[in-house]
Amino acid sequence: MTPRSTDSQASRDLPLHALRVFEVCARHLNFTKAARELRVTQAAVSQQIAGLEAYLGLHLFRRVGRGVVLTDDGTSYLIAVREALAHLDLATRKLRARRDEAVIICSIATTIAMRWLVPRLRGFTLAHPGTEVRLSITERFVDFAREDVDIAIRYGAGTWPGVVSDLLFRESLVPVCSPELLRGERPIARPADLAGHTLLHSANSLQDWAHWLAATGTNGIDAKRGLIFDQPHLALQAAADALGVAIADRSLVEAEIASGRLATPFDVKLARAEGYYVVGPAAARDSLQVGPFWHWLLAQAVTKS
């Protein structure tokens, strides 16, 4: 036999149905029994196997009495075919489950998930009871083409290659602390009073205090001193526990300010060009599944305060 197609054609012309027939025949080692399982005629099975052998340019079976046995080539090919069919079956079941359950997977960083999205998420689930939102917590920007993610909320300038984005809100930095510090032995009434308190930093935004102090014209304070935490929400927890003064995006601490758990010593904000964006493939924004969640997020940003 000789192959009927070039390598470049092979991936396009691969007879997928014949692979399924081959696997069933290899399991029964009998074309009649395989035809019975597949609910087709024996002639149809023989035709599929003959076509596959012609396509491959080799023999997969050898007839023995009323049955068949696999050739050496057929035995090695069967291992690859079964593995490929198992992968296809798994992918198909996952796709059907996603469709039936209407699951949306959202990639999001820890702090904005805890302090902005999760407190609002019940509103979406009540309005869309047939849709489940699953949060994939990560600090990195995911690859939508390679990872099982539908939508993301990310901090930045709003320009990422290969995706579209809509602004939720821009960052606006304010100092925050426990109300205890405002009433303590060293009250905080003006920015210069920060010299008597520990500055709390997040490791991924170590320049925030320096930028805020410079923007407010506050001198004589070392912006690098204080405690450094791996995550912003840990710095905010430390602030609530009266360990010092943190600096945070106002939108992410609104609820704690309203509840009295955190306080702003002075409402002097530093507006930033960067902000939080809804991000995803262009098709996701208006898709039947992801689109409603995308637009709900934008509506929440409009009413965030």
Image (cartoon, rainbow, N blue to C red):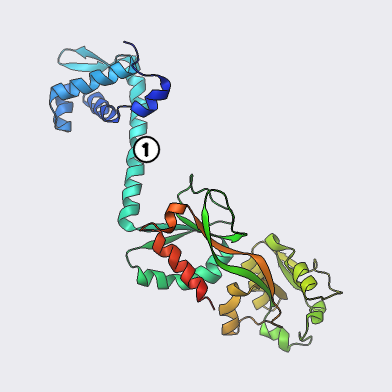
Amino acid type, mark 1:
His
Give the residue at x 66% y 65%.
Answer: 273
Give the residue at x 47% y 72%.
Answer: 120
User: Could you tell me if residue 16 is visible in this image?
Assistant: yes
Task: Please state if 254 lies on the left or on the right of 81 as rendered.
Answer: right
- According to the picture, the residue beneath numbered tag 1 turns out to be 87
Q: Name the quadrant of the N terminus.
A: top left
What x and y, as percent, mark residue 142? Answer: 54, 51
Task: Please state if 244 lies on the left or on the right of 196 as rendered.
Answer: left
Task: Please state if 88 lies on the left or on the right of 161 as rendered.
Answer: left
Callout 1 environment at 10 Å: few (<14), some (14 to 19), or many (20+)? few
Q: Name the quadrant of the C terminus.
A: bottom right
What x and y, as percent, mark residue 250? Answer: 62, 75
Whether residue 85 is situated above or below residue 214 in the rendered picture: above
User: Could you tell me if residue 29 is visible in this image?
Assistant: no
Q: Secondary structure at mark 1?
A: helix
Give the residue at x 35% y 63%.
Answer: 131
Foreground of the two, 204 or 213: 213
Whether residue 36 is situated above or below residue 151 in the rendered picture: above
Task: Please state if 86 lies on the left or on the right of 266 as rendered.
Answer: left
What x and y, as percent, mark residue 199? Answer: 75, 72
Residue 197, picture quadrant:
bottom right
